[in-house]
Image: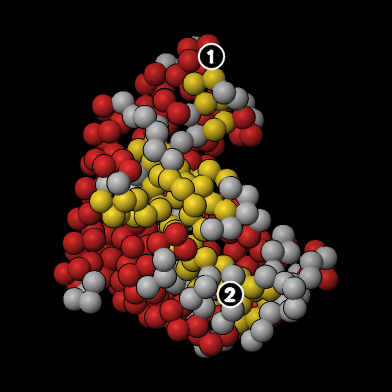
């Protein structure tokens, strides 16, 4: 289905909790026409109808359609992938590997055959392995396939810091590197409160360093905390809004520096791996990876995290011989 002349086209592969929220946000922001794809029959069509009927109330112009046919994603400018199975309580992100790897194969082929010029943002867990696999299966250039995790993890870190210091979230610039797992690396040395390094700010406010350590730990486990509370499924509002900020950076050629799971070759001592790093996103997709100076401790934490990602890639290769 063609998009309205002059409008961008955004295809959402997976129309579950995050997919539906993405569609609502993209429509409200009039980012373009929206196609909701899912293997579940009727569900994306139903959500598309429901969301379309928000238009008159909210005053947005966006054509929203639902489909079970990959042909309908043709010509998409941006594709956001959430297809797969979310974590259930007690299940680690890695348990999802086998199930979601097969999903990435189907999605990668669907993209390759129908929308090879799109900028693709992967959200499906385990994130760093799935974005790598999706890139392999789709055959798209590395700069056009990226994973969403760091924007969310940094947002979680920023939220907890803003609460702790009783300051506006707008003034917190939080920084998280590494894989999207419990080994992620919230980097306090680059985390600032309106430009003031967080550790200095803690001293000013009389907040003990152990509180910062607790917040770092809560950030690492931020996804699991929500999984445990919801009892069924995982977070979706903040994941969706995080991916939307990445899509906007691409569509608007904003050159934003966002922490994303990007393909890193050479920098950070890595040899061709998707992992969370500060990334410039503009019209060229992921245009650059910024390599920051890290302390020895941060370096070794990052190594633990990238080793965990590498292990997952090996597991993927064991599960699918085409990888
Ligand atoms: O930071 C991050 N990257 C994440 C990742 C934060 C939160 C959640 N994260 C992961 O996103 C989560 O572990 C899942 O792997 C995805 C999607 O989460 P969501 O909450 O949206 O899951 P749902 O509601 O179960 O939706 C998934 C949909 C569902 O409608 C299925 O029918 C569909 O995916 N699905 C498929 N669509 C297309 N093609 C295939 N093969 C397919 N298989 C399932």
| Residue 270 at x, y percent in the picture | 27, 47
Point 69% across, 64% down: residue:
31
| Residue 44 at x, y percent in the picture | 57, 80
| Residue 95 at x, y percent in the picture | 26, 62
From this view, report whether residue 42 is shown above or below residue 237: below
> Which residue is the site of mark 2?
76
In the image: residue 25, left or right of residue 132: right
The quadrant of the picture occupied by the N terminus is bottom right
Contact between labelled residues 2 and 1, with CB atoms less than 8 Å apart: no
Which quadrant of the structure image shows residue 315?
Answer: bottom left
In the image: residue 147, left or right of residue 311: right
> Which residue is the site of mark 1?
205
Point 74% across, 79% down: residue:
4
**Is residue 134 among the parts visible in the rendering?**
no
Q: Is mark 1 within 8 Å of ligand 1?
A: no
Check the image and tell me how it is coloured: secondary structure
Point 54% across, 58% down: residue:
284
In the image: residue 287, left or right of residue 65: left
Q: Is mark 2 within 8 Å of ligand 1?
A: no
Q: Earlier in the sequence, mark 1 or mark 2?
A: 2
The quadrant of the picture occupied by the C terminus is bottom left
**Element on which disc 1 rests:** helix
Which quadrant of the structure image shows residue 75?
Answer: bottom right
Mark-to-mark CA distance, 1 and 2:
49 Å
Label 1 crowd bin: few (<14), some (14–19), many (20+), radius 10 Å = few
In this rendered view, identify the residue nearer to me: 116 or 153. 116
**Is residue 247 among the parts visible in the rendering?**
yes
In this rendered view, identify the residue nearer to me: 249 or 309. 249
| Residue 18 at x, y percent in the picture | 53, 64
Number of numbered discs present? 2
């Amino acid at each position: 289905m063609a998009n309205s002349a002059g409008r961008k086209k955004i295809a959402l592969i997976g129309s579950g909790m995050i997919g539906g929220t993405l569609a609502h946000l993209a429509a409200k922001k009039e980012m373009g026409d929206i196609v909701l794809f899912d293997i579940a029959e009727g569900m994306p069509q139903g959500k598309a109808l429901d969301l379309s009927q928000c238009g008159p109330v909210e005053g947005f112009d966006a054509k929203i359609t639902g489909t079970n046919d990959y042909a309908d994603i043709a010509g998409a400018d941006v594709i956001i992938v959430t297809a797969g199975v979310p974590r259930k309580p007690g299940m680690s992100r890695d348990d999802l590997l086998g199930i979601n790897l097969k999903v990435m194969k189907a999605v990668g082929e669907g993209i390759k055959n129908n929308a090879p010029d799109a900028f693709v943002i992967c959200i499906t867990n385990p994130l760093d392995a799935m974005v790598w696999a999706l890139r392999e299966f789709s055959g798209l250039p590395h700069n056009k396939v990226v994973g969403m995790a760091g924007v969310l993890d940094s947002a979680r870190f920023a939220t907890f810091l803003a609460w702790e210091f009783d300051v506006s979230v707008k003034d917190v610039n939080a920084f998280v590197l590494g894989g999207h797992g419990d080994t992620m690396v919230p980097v306090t040395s680059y985390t600032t409160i309106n430009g003031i390094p967080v550790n200095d700010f803690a001293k000013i406010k009389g907040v003990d360093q152990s509180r910062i350590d607790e917040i770092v730990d809560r950030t690492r486990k931020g996804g699991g905390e929500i999984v445990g509370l919801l009892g069924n499924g995982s977070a979706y509002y903040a994941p969706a809004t995080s991916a939307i900020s990445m899509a906007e950076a691409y569509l608007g050629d904003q050159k934003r520096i966002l922490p994303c799971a990007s393909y890193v070759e050479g920098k950070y001592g890595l040899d061709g791996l998707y992992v969370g790093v500060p990334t410039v996103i503009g019209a060229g997709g992921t245009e650059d990876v910024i390599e920051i100076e890290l302390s020895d401790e941060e370096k070794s934490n990052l190594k633990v995290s990238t080793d965990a990602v590498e292990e997952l890639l090996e597991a993927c290769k064991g599960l699918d011989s085409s990888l």
